[in-house]
Amino acid sequence: MLAASRQFLKPRSGSRFFQSHYGAWIDGKEFNPPNAATYDVEDPARRTKLCTVLDADAAVVDKAVKSSRAAFESGSWSRMDVRDRAEILNEGARALRKRVPEFAEVESIQTGRAIREMNAQLGRLPEWLEYFAAMIRTHEGTCPPFKGNYVNYVKRVPLGVAGLITPWNHPMLIAIKKIAPALAAGNSIIVKPSEFAPITVLEFAKLMTEVGLPNGVFNCVAGQGGCGAALSGHSDLDMVDLTGGTPTGRKVHAAAGENLCTVLSELGGKAPMVVFNDADIDQAINGTVFGSFIATGQTCIAGTRLLVQEDIYDEFVARYVEKVKKIGIGDPQNPNTQMGPVINQGQLDKVREFCSLGVQEGGKLLCGGKQPDGLGAEISNGYYWEPTVIGDCTPDMRVVREEVFGPVIVAYSFKDEADAIAKANDSDFGLAASVWSKDIKRAHRVADRLDVGIVWLNDHHRNDPSSPWGGMKDSGVGRENGIEALHEYTQTRSVVVGFDDTPFDWFIEGDARYG
Ligand code: NAD
């Protein structure tokens, strides 16, 4: 189904918000070295150029790291009173909240994500800054029961300089999930947004400088190819935090390991949605279609494996497919559009290949599997793909085992609870899952057996700054959100205070105490 067309809101090129060229953001200002290489950022719905961006190389990355290190050592942020630090984060939240419509518009244009999604998603992002501001104001150290006449107090202190590397699917959400706890903890950061969608994160670095974050505390370098590798392999980082694909995760862990640097990684997924025959079928259909196709299926926790109990499989999948066929594809800027294009030619090729592969492997194409027709002249060249469902799959198929990261869902059945758990867990990934059942005991029992970091019961895709986020197995190491995130971005300093007045000399001769 095509969404009704509407006049396209062009980005306000040249306005304060949207620039025709972006450099790196270093030391509180834009940095553009002379004769440096640039690259184009594209609108995936139109395949038109949006702006150019400095292609930050290893020298630019090094400059950013040196600036962050100097800012950290200066104590301008790392030793600022936590109440003042929290106030600047809250100021950032207020400034961002006022500008959500502008950020959402550009986020939608650079990613191709429907504007209704970006308004909803970006409207919540100030909460991450507020949550971690509140956390540092209220966080208390510990005082372990050290034996003897000692008081032992343990404080959490920042790690130092952190490199944050982020993907294109939720550019602002994923960046802020990392930026908020990293800054709250007192670190200095260098953010490397995806080359495909760097604009809003570069703008956010500027916004945080405007609200009083000291220069150098938040630097931002966008670049293709070697930029992320130059950052993750930099010898003066204390932490690297990556959200990206599992192959990138392996490279980043290896590079950071050389420098004995802390690594947090949020990687790929292949989330199962397990639908039992006692589920509320109407709600399960609405919820699983949402879980599968929000963000054009380009999310790490997308419900890409639809596992349905065998006695309701035919009916459930038929109704699921009917709903999928009604998803409104169109111009991301149109508020009626429910699904936009995928991000680029590479993703479109990958989606096409996996659809063919699924059918070759024995799956049954139930809907989609092609580019949509009749999109209208303006977006007819965009990287669009119809939401696709491949039924009657088996666990050994590549389309079932590998991450497609697009609107391609595989469906297969299970017999009973044990079979559901076995099939859901039969994956290299372990990020997220949902369980659909009205039997509360069964739902919790199954949740307890799934090898994943996040389980939703009768829901999918929900996220909150307070709720731990991260994967098991090949889906990554560590957790975002909540107190876990503050712990990830800090280390402990344990101070042991002796208060015994008895004179002490270990090397005194003939003292019975030491005999
Ligand atoms: P990607 O791995 O291609 O790129 C992610 C980031 O890493 C980009 O900024 C990229 O420039 C950079 N990068 C690439 N090669 C690098 C290297 N060798 N060293 C350092 N940095 C490098 O991923 P993508 O295509 O941007 O995003 C899609 C992937 O991200 C999917 O696999 C998806 O599942 C995953 N993801 C995971 C989560 C999560 O929370 N677990 C959330 C969103 C996306």
Image (cartoon, rainbow, N blue to C red):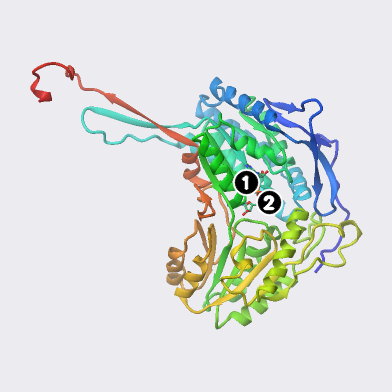
Residues 85 and 361: in front is: 361
**Label 2 near ligand 1 (CB < 8 Å):** yes
- Residue name at image x 85 percent, y 45 percent: 49
Any part of residue 157 in sight: yes
User: Disc 1 beta carbon < 8 A from ligand 1?
Assistant: yes
- For the image, the number of numbered tags is 2
Instruction: Answer left or right for 375 relative to 513.
Output: right
Q: Residues within 10 Å of mark 2 (few under 14, many from 20)?
A: many
Residue depicted at x 47% and y 35% = 490
Question: Identity of the amino acid at label 1?
Answer: Ile
Residue at the spot of label 2: 169
Q: Alpha-carbon distance for marks 1 and 2? A: 9 Å
Residue under the point 72% across and 43% down: 195
Residue 497 percent across, percent down from the top left: 29, 24
Q: Upstream in the sequence, badge 1 or badge 2?
A: 2
Reply above or below: 52 against 357.
Answer: above
Name the residue that disc number 1 marks: 174
